[in-house]
Amino acid sequence: MFCMKKVFQFGIYPAIMLSASAIILYGIRSGYNQYLVTVPVITLTGILILVLEQWMPYEKNWVGGKDDWNLDLTYYIINYSIKLIAQFLFIWLAESISFLSLFPMQLPFWMQVIIALTIIDFFLFLVHWQSHKYQFLWKLHAIHHSSERLYFLNGEKRHALHQVIEGTPGIILCLVIGTPQPVVVVALAILAVNMFMQHTNLDYKAGILKKFFCVAELHRWHHRADYKDAQVNYGAWLTIWDRLFNTAYDSPKMQTELGAIGIAEEKNFPKNYWKQFLYPFNKKIRQNSKTILLIAAMLFINGIVFSQMYADAITGNWQLQDGSKKISVVKEDGKYVGKIYWVKDMSKNNEIGRRVLWNLEYDADDKEWKGGEIQLPDIGHSASCYIKLKDVNTAIVTGYHGMRLFGKTKTLTRVN
């Protein structure tokens, strides 16, 4: 029995992280809608962790012992809904913006996800760290620390504005270097699962993995009630940032040294969502127009970011349905261009490098790439064309003369 418990304690973290990640990656690569894959996986993983917390809690007093479930669930639903609605809304409203094409889209999809997740994680660490140094950021972030127990829902308990401030820098960099939107969506989903495991009340052990990943054994130290003791372990996914900036902390004596959770300096912290939302905005803050303008700018930029990420979803490597050619689609001067980079028939090697799609621009209203032309070598003449994504891995290209209604279509499948 003792042996089985140890196996479970050391095996549950990698089992949950690997299985959730594998299911998400498989679903996306199989062509399913990214949100129909990520949202159910995150939800079911949360339910599983909730059940496991009841069965083998780290701290028994944290099991349903506080009147905070409804509040924390409200935070999770609102904050996750904000993420989803913002993406759909901004994709519809914002126009395409031309950025760099530095992201290594030739790598396997899972490696692209790791790169994007590492970028996002670094900026989450950086903003989190600074949120413990500056008064207004701390007032926003204090909501996350106000919980007097730790369990899986705590990870998403944060002020809506702080969520924007934390997430914007990493997402912007991903955009600037040309990261495809599906890659970022998957990275954020995997991060959401790790946030469950980072805050969970499940009594698991990460073993050697805690040298690399931000797990509950490390993050509990960050939630100590005494403010001066909580200035450690800011990372969300990787521990490397805490190690580089000398903010990492661990001790084998957690059971005796951890102490109270929460904010010792705030004895009467608000207990409902609206009062907590208003908590950071005292009279002095309201008069600080620079702070308000900064937040507004980040909200605006965040919207443009998600729009551009969707516009760039067409970039990457594609194969014709008959398998005869592979085409690389890139952005040049704000427009999308496709060139042949592989042919099945070696006698047609002279076609490699030939431009077959050009002048395509993204239309956010119709969610299609239009205004371009197509000319495949075996056709000989060019035609007007537009492209729609059936799903993240399937593009429908329609070439036409005059009326779109009478156009001919070709199907492209995404390849590595």
Image (cartoon, rainbow, N blue to C red):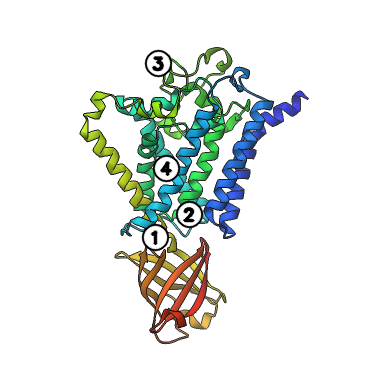
Q: CA distance from mark 3 to mark 2?
A: 41 Å
Q: Identify the image quadrant of the N terminus.
A: top right
Front-most of residues 138 and 405: 405
Q: Which residue is mark 4?
A: 120
Q: CA distance from mark 2 to mark 1?
A: 11 Å
Query: Image point 44% across, 68% down: which residue?
Result: 328
Q: CA distance from mark 2 to mark 4?
A: 14 Å
Q: Which residue is mark 3?
A: 266
Q: Earlier in the sequence, mark 2 or mark 4?
A: 4
Three-letter residue code for mark 4: Ile
Element under disc 4: helix
Element under disc 2: helix
At label 2, counting other C-alpha atoms closer than 10 Å, the crowd grade (few under 14, some 14-19, many 20 or more) is many
Q: Earlier in the sequence, mark 3 or mark 2?
A: 2
Q: Which residue is mark 2?
A: 182
Q: Nearer the viewer, mark 3 or mark 1?
A: 3
Q: Position of residue 148 (x, y in %)?
A: 50, 19
Q: Earlier in the sequence, mark 3 or mark 4?
A: 4
Q: CA distance from mark 3 to mark 1?
A: 45 Å
Q: Are marks 3 and 4 in contact (CB under 8 Å)?
A: no
